[in-house]
Every structure is written in C-alpha cells, then in structure tokens.
Amino acid sequence: MVLLAAWVARDFLVALTWAVVIAITAWPIYARFEGPAFGGRSPALAPLLFTLMTGLVLLVPLVLAVHQIAQGSDAIARSLNQLQQSGIPVPAWLARLPASILICGGGPTSATRRFWSTGFAA
C-alpha cells in the first residue's frame, strides 16, 4: 500500500516540496499576522486573509511577467517577419574570418552572400 501511495504521489512531489518550503518560510510571518490583528476572534479569518495575501504575493509578479512577455511578443513577431521577408544582411566581419578565406577562396562568394541575405529561401 505504501508503495502504491508513493507511486501515485510521485507526480505531485515537486508541488508538495514547494508547498512545504512556502509553508515553512511563511510560518513566522503568519504567527505575527495572526496574533495581534485577530486575537482569536475568528478562527477562519486570519488563515483566509493570509492565504489570499500569499497568493497575491506569488501570483502578481507572474501575471506582470506574462503581461510584459505578451506586449513584447508583437515586436518580436514583427522583427522575425521582417527578417524573413528581407533576409539577414551579410556581416562585414565574415570576409575576415580564416574559415571563409579557406572555404570561399579569398572571401564570401555569391552563394554565401545569397544565403546570408535570403536565408534558406534561395
């Protein structure tokens, strides 16, 4: 039975480990939060508010990061589309590389220039 339980729980071990780490690190903050603010008046209010605040602390940066990525994805898509249409210009340092001298015979050939300017489309 224990082996079966371990086999089922194996997929959840990463999430459980993070839950344990967050619970252990948040416990001192929760103890300070619960004591003076609520004083035992409502046994469910302090855990509820602390859980909501912890969720906000963990989720707000994630939501902001996803928002920034979504805003930048339009510019990246435009840049990739422009590069696909116009090609990548031949770098000036390519002719100075020893490998290009040996392979291309003294500098980039027209085939090399065509590849660098149009990519795989040619």
Image: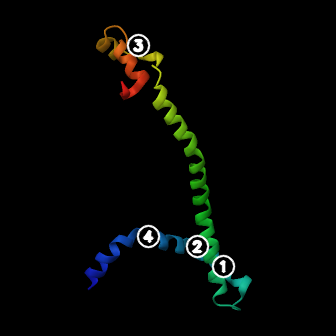
**Structure colour scheme:** rainbow
Query: Which residue has dot 3 on it?
Result: 95
Name the amino acid type tagged 4: Ala
Instruction: Please name the amino acid that badge 3 sits on.
Output: Ala
Residue 97 located left or right of residue 33: left
Task: Name the residue at the right extreme.
Answer: 37
**Foreground label between 3 and 2:** 3
Asked if labels 3 and 4 touch by Cβ distance under 8 angstroms, the answer is: no
Per the model, the C-alpha gap separating discs 4 and 2 is 16 Å
Residue 14 sits in which quadrant?
A: bottom left
Residue 40 x/y as whole percent: 69, 91
Q: Is residue 59 above or below residue 74?
A: below
Which of pointers 4 and 3 indicates the residue nearer the eye?
3
Q: Is residue 48 left or right of residue 39?
A: left
Determine the secondary structure under disc 4: helix
Please name the residue that numbered disc 1 is placed on. 49
Q: What's the residue type where badge 1 is placed?
A: Leu
- Type of the residue with mark 2: Ala
Residue at image position (47%, 69%) is 18
Q: Earlier in the sequence, mark 2 or mark 1?
A: 2
x%, y% of residue 81?
Answer: 50, 35
Tell which of 105 and 30 is nearer to you: 105
Where is mark 2, residue-wise? Answer: 26
| Residue with the mark numbered 4 | 15
Q: Does the residue at mark 3 contact the one at mark 2 (Cβ under 8 Å)?
A: no
Disc 1 packing (10 Å; few <14; some 14–19; many ≥20): few
